[in-house]
Image (cartoon, rainbow, N blue to C red):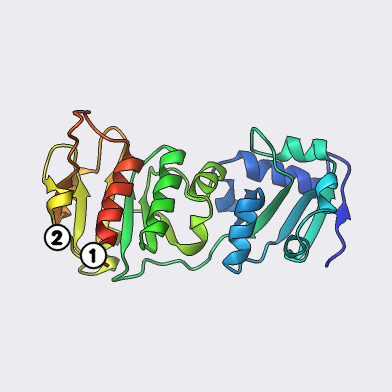
Amino acid sequence: MNTPISIKSRDNPLLKELRKLVRDNTGYRKAGHFWVEGEHLCSAALQRQQKPKVAVFSEDYLAVAPVEYTQAAIKSIVIPGGLFRELSGLESPSAVGFVLDLPVDINIQPQVPTVLLDRVQDAGNVGSILRSAGAFGFRQVIATKGTAALWSPKVLRSAMGAHFGLNLIEGVEIDALEALGPLPLIVTSSHLGALVQNLKLPQPCVWAFGHEGQGVCPDLFARAAMLVQIGQPGGEESLNVAAAAAICLHASSLTF
């Protein structure tokens, strides 16, 4: 175990940097690392062989922290509970967090079952879709410009650890999708196409899910190999994009 460094001052430069990382949704892009908090996300990171740059513990938690947490990081710090609550991005703060390096040199992988997010703006929706992608065997998620920041704290919390099993590429222009190769693009619509439950879905494929209000952009519609909709016998106008994605990705997983 590396010996934790005790920090008592809220003005400590490292704590200032951490607070900025937690509060700035896109700060990870400049910093090159990101923050996860709580036992579930920390455990998920370690299970995927992630090596934290920094582990942060509250003073009252360190004595009972699992040994895999205390030995995990290159550097560990311990801070008073009040400073951890101030640092935390949660309404009910945890007592442990990791700073992890962003993946580097990430490129679009051809012929890999893929989810494409086109300007999906709600971070909770994005995180939920990432979780569904991981659950149903889709190992790559591509986000166009205008989509919520994939490694932001809220997306990380909503995805519940799915990030660590996915190839994630964000800020992509539509033309860059050529790198996927000949994978068929399936576009969801609230009113066009065949019912997903009646289709034999291609596999592997790319599922596209669009903006909460506008849907996918016209360029993606033009590229679609298949348009699908979800039957709604209850008569609602449309489904939340995260719910729709879960239904569609589950339908695809039945063809694996």
- Seen from the viewer's position, the closer of residues 173 and 111 is 111
Residue most extreme to the front = 234
Quarter of the image holding residue 94?
A: top right
Quarter of the image holding residue 109?
A: bottom left
Left or right: 34 with respect to 105?
Answer: right
Classed neighbour count for the residue bearing mark 1: other residues with Cα under 10 Å, few (<14), some (14–19), many (≥20): few
Residue placed under numbered mark 2 in the picture: 200
Left or right: 28 with respect to 146?
Answer: right
Residue placed under numbered mark 1 in the picture: 255
Measured from the top left, where is residue 176 in percent x and y?
Answer: 30, 60
At x 72%, y 49%, the residue is: 96
Measured from the top left, where is residue 234 in percent x and y?
Answer: 20, 30
- Seen from the viewer's position, the closer of residues 166 and 201 is 201
Measured from the top left, where is residue 181 in percent x and y?
Answer: 24, 69
Separation (CA) of disc 1 from disc 2: 8 Å
At x 36%, y 59%, the residue is: 136
Left or right: 168 with respect to 96?
Answer: left
